[in-house]
Amino acid sequence: MRIQKSYMAPCDMKKQWYCINGEGQVLGRLAVEVANILMGKHRPTYTPHLDTGDFVVVTNCKKIKVTGKKLREKVYYSWTGYPGGLRTQTLLEKSEKHPTEPLYLAVRRMLPKSTLGQQMLTKLKLYPDEQHPHAAQCPQVWKNLK
């Protein structure tokens, strides 16, 4: 009987840059795609305990849409640390003040809750408009969006 050896991705893999246009995309579905690219699940060399993912630049974050009544009914909670210090914000309020924050939070919550997840999150670049300063990296357009 032959024992199959498990694959170990090399640590010095070349990272790609991908650009995604968020205009007209649904928030949760876009966040899943971005999280999978950051983790490296789109590659055949995916290894769960290594950072095999790529860089992602998302433009037009303020034109991302949501379905249903989420704009008014989805609530983000934060706590100041003091008694009675629970602060709430709806998705509409949060996206008006910080247009990239809803996508950032959605992607962050889909990544591993460890230092590896924090390392993956540093490869995410979000911009509310079409312009971004990463033209020198020659990001490829990600075409697998539905």
Image: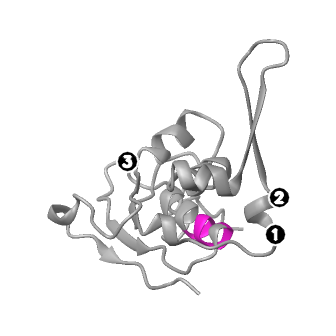
Q: Residues within 10 Å of mark 1 (few under 14, many from 20)?
A: few
Residue at the image position 47 percent from the left and 49 percent from the top: 51
Which sits in the foreground, 141 or 69? 69
Residue at the image position 57 percent from the left and 70 percent from the top: 33
Return the residue at label 3.
11
Q: Estimate the spatial distance between the alpha carbons at disc 1 and disc 2, rounded to whole Å.
A: 6 Å
Which sits in the foreground, 129 or 125? 129
Give the extent of the magenta segment: 28-33
Q: Quadrant of residue 25?
A: bottom right
Residue 111 x %, y %: 62, 49
Task: Give the quarter of the figure containing the N terminus.
Answer: bottom right
Lateral position of residue 124 relative to residue 113, left or right: left
Question: Label 3 sits on what residue type?
Answer: Cys
Task: Give the quarter of the figure containing the C terminus.
Answer: bottom right
Frontmost of labels 1 and 3 is: 1
Residue at the image position 57 percent from the left and 64 percent from the top: 36
Lateral position of residue 109 relative to residue 62, left or right: right
Image: 121 above or below 131: above
Q: Quadrant of residue 103?
A: bottom right
Return the residue at label 1.
69
Q: Secondary structure at mark 2?
A: helix
Mark positioned earlier in the residue sequence (1 or 3) = 3
30 in magenta: yes
Q: Secondary structure at mark 1?
A: loop
Return the residue at label 2.
73
Question: Label 1 sits on what residue type?
Answer: Lys
68 in magenta: no
Mark positioned earlier in the residue sequence (3 or 2) = 3
